Amino acid sequence: MTSEETQTARSGDPLLAVERLTKTYPGVVANYEIDLDLFAGEIHAVLGENGAGKTTLMGAIYGLNRPDSGRIRFEGVEVELDSPRTALGLGIGYVQQHFSLIPTLTVAENLVLSLRSSGEKVAVREGERRVRELSKRYGLDVPPDVSVENLSVGQQQRAEVLKALAKDARVLILDEPTSVVTPQEAAELAAVLQRLASEGVGIFLISHKLEEVLRIAHRISVLRHGRLVGTLAASEASQTRLAEMMVGSLATAADAAASPPSAAGDPVLVVDHVSIPGDYGRLGVRDITFVARAGEVVGVAGVEGSGQVELMEGLAGVRPIASGTASLAGELLNGLPARERQRRGVAHVPADRLGTGFVGTLSIAENLILPLADDDRFSRYGVMRRQAVTEHARSLIAEYDIRVAGPDVLAGTLSGGNQQRLVLARELSRSPVVVLASFATRGLDFASTEAVHRRILEMRDAGACVLYASVELDELLTLTDRIIVLHHGTLAGELPTVEATSEQLGLLMGGSAA
Amino acid sequence: MRILRIVQARSLAGAVLVPVAAVVLALASVAVLLMLIGADPAEAFGSMFQASLGDPHALSTTVTKAVPRLVAALGIAVAIRAGLWNIGAEGQIYMGGVAATAVVLFAPELPFPLIPLLAIAAAIIAGAAWGAIPGALRAWRGVNEVITSLMLVYVAVQISRYMLEVPWAIPGATFPSTEPFGSYARLPILVPATLLNLGAVLAVIAAIAAWYLVDRTRFGLNLRAVGGNPRASGFLGIRVKWMIFAVMAISGAFAGLAGSIEVLGVRGRLIEGFSQAYGFEAIAVALLGRLHPAGIVGAALLFGALDAGGAGLQTAARGVSSSIVQIAAGLSVGYVLVGLGIQEKFRERRRASEALADTERTHGVEAAGGSSEASR
Amino acid sequence: MDQDFLALLLVAAVTLAGPLLIAALGELISETAGVINIQLEGMMLAGAFSGVAGALLTQNIALAFLAAIGGGLAVAALHGIACFWFRANQIVSGITLNILVLGTTTFLLVSAMGADVTQSVVRVERIAIPVLADIPVIGQALFNQNIVVYLAMLGVPLTWWMLDRTPFGLALRAAGERPEAAESLGIDVHRVRWAALAICGALAGIGGGLLTLGGLGFFTPGVTAGRGFIALAAVVFGRWRPFGALAAVLLFSVVDAFQIRAQTLGFPVPYQLLVALPYLVTIIALAGLVTRMRPPSALGVNYER
């Protein structure tokens, strides 16, 4: 084991120590007998695949969930972290992946709530002053009196960090902080973290990005299937070593990357000066023009909230097109209902898999034919043909490798990876002309991510036109043939993938001209 | 495979066991209430039994009292399966009763099945229209159907009163009602010397129709999809707004049918207050029957028996009977909610400990694998 | 004559508005924290009943209102137990409680009284505020009311201030908007929601008590006649804001007062349709809401730690 070696790297007692911590949820052991510690002034990265148990572990340290067994010591004293109030009182701050800010309240009001629950009674006016002061001190620019929902994602993250720092944090936890912002914003954040560490704050940094972890962390722990695989000093670690620890073996990791550029065919999807409404009366997409061809994967890059989702939904027919025209193989899509677009060959893998991807209370078989329910194969005179529905499901379950007991299982009981396979099976088995996929690998483990990538490339090779939205630049750089970049709903740039770099894409995503 | 069977078996047990236990508890609670007002519960239940199940006439009273609650509950359950709350079945029952009466009063005397058929059709249309209003408002204006469907109850009751007190009023009558209908317009009694009328058969047909519609048709599939996840249904190309409108109309149609059965079969005329909160109790019937037509039939018979039996209470003052039904209805659904909550917590705890046991069993194996990997 | 009509109409409207307003403020507070109370009607009915029962037992108006609060709180407690402890759907729980309260109050009334109507022995008296009560048209309506109505009027700005300006109000909004995030901010979502639900139960109980101890003076089964649902609608129509709820309540009450006056004055419209008018106006008002409605995001959604 490597953890012993690194104990000598630091002297004194750890600031925070987790001992033999186990946490179970119905049907899954999220953490099993985990030992982890954190010293003052260190950045300790916690690495692992999606579902490895990182967030659950950090939740236990912050008091969001109560472990079944095990201990947590703070400065050597065993503490019972039964709620975030206790954690906040000890000076533990948590910047969550899905920000824990109330969208309808201002930044200062959020701060006031947080401070009060750790015992410090502060008026809103005073909260605004504190936000300004902290902004200045750490160089994190956040307006105090604006509702959180009106802030950009980057600003929200800075607000979240400020909130965590307001209580003179001794321990700061950050969950995947760089996955939602531009590379430039990520670099700024890294600088702030290094400065905090030099001031003696202990930092847990959750990530799945090896390169970033190696750059800024002092120690790295790897979780897999809820267990601690090992802890390394950053100096001893390498990308290959860490990847091996995360996945268990490297046999599959290299496959997806290599995909020969395809020969693009005729224009299939023509988007001409299109604007699409977003939520709460704002425009999600403004005046976008581009062409996508048969047999190519067009990446749609942007930070979260930049209009990628609205664009896809507008093309899929679940959001209206406010102005401009979108056409498929020369025929206008504007105004056509979603079902008609499906008939004409539009497939949609939506961004919010749980919310809009499938119906959890229906069986897998029923989910697989929902868009085809009025097809003669599956219903006659309005009555379902149950035999045909089941047969159809059996063949797709086999073909798409959905790991499940049978076609009658409720879709809501599937794991994330199997849910996405279900969505892919339903959408791609209809031989679509255009595939619209948003954040299709979000929350998936390596194997399922692989499966998604393979299917997308298969569709491209079969001559479909694929629009693939992602916030992960690495994914876009390996999977796509061409990338368009969105910023605040407008088209910030378009370039062939072979010529693109993540720095360049990051600048475009952040709104600076390349 | 193993987990699947357990889940299904569990939910089957939950579908029968929890409601039955809840009903037993609710009846026990009612017994305590009866004791509190000085009645001897054994004697009270005895006379309730006699009045509800004791002889063919009593039995037919139970069935007759179950029918309107059953038919309205079918419609409410269909709506809930689509994620919609049709709280206004009571109003739809009134509109059905008024429409059926209008047909009887205005149509000429025709050979037997024609007038009841026309009257029932009119009642179904009227109930559907009354349900479609909150449906349309929900679908296209985003207005919560709970409030609007309920507001329409009060409007329907007033429409019924207006019809009875103005155009259809009998001069000099003390209680607002129409003249009794001729036998050509009524649902015939099936078994002589009982109250059992053709309405019971219509109710059974309605139950089968509701089951077939929801579980076997394309419309039912779309309905269940909308109920399970309306946003995803929209993404999958289902016309969600239209479905909301249609389902609320269908839900109202069932209640309208219930109203016509009560008027044509039981009362034989339109009379003020002919539905004694049947439409509200039907909500409890639908929930206690776990939204399944078979369960709803059982729950409706239970409430019918309580209603019939309550009337047999010696000590009963006016109004006790229907209040006992409401208390039993409220309590049994309440106990079902508690029972399901407990069941869910137990199931989660069991699944968590199963997962932990699995992990502990495989731990040794993987630790060995891990060390060989490290030594590589 | 016209001025008299208007003055009398306003007196009746404000009297009718009192119970609705108190219940609506309670529901507004509860919904802000994410708890919906379809059983608002049942809470009012319980308050109306226990208020009269308390008056009969104690002959004391203050104790009678205390009993009314107890009635509302009891229903709130059942709702909280079902939803917060046993994860029941809030709408199902609310509907069930309405039926249960209707049955229980009727049962208790009929079995105790042997009749289905009972007079209250004490009533809450009007207190005229000198000078102000003599203002033409609005004087009698606004300044010759009972203490509970005065408190309800004060409750509107108070609720606004509480929700908008106090940390407790922020916590309520946080719990109703994003409970998970609120918990991360250190708020005890369950405690906040229990508090909001209790406030709602107490206020709805007072509203029901005001109905029987103030306006009507008697209790009869289902005496609330949908007022709880109108109060529920007022919260929506008022777009989850205290002054909005006040405006909505006043609209319904003026229509209600008008239909009562119209009946006594012999308007050439069938009275049955006049009785239905406030309910129709509620529907039309909700249907006509043009601006986008935005309820608290987590309204009706149970929170699991």
Image: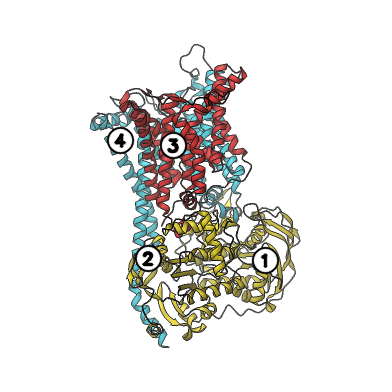
The correct choice, above or below, for A297 with respect to B375 in the image is: above
Q: Residue at x 55, y 39 (%)?
A: C243
Label 2 amino acid? Thr
Q: Position of residue C219 (x, y in %)?
A: 40, 26
Q: CA distance from mark 4 to mark 1?
A: 65 Å
Q: CA distance from mark 3 to mark 4?
A: 19 Å
Q: Are marks 2 and 1 on the same chain?
A: yes
Q: Are marks 1 and 3 on the same chain?
A: no
* Foreground tag (4 vs 1): 1
Q: Residues within 10 Å of mark 1 (few under 14, many from 20)?
A: many
- Shade of chain B as shown in the rendered figure: cyan
Label 4 amino acid? Val
Mark carried by residue A486? 1
Q: Closer to the N terminus: mark 2 or mark 1? A: 2
Label 1 amino acid? Leu
Mark carried by residue B30? 4
- Shade of chain C as shown in the rendered figure: red
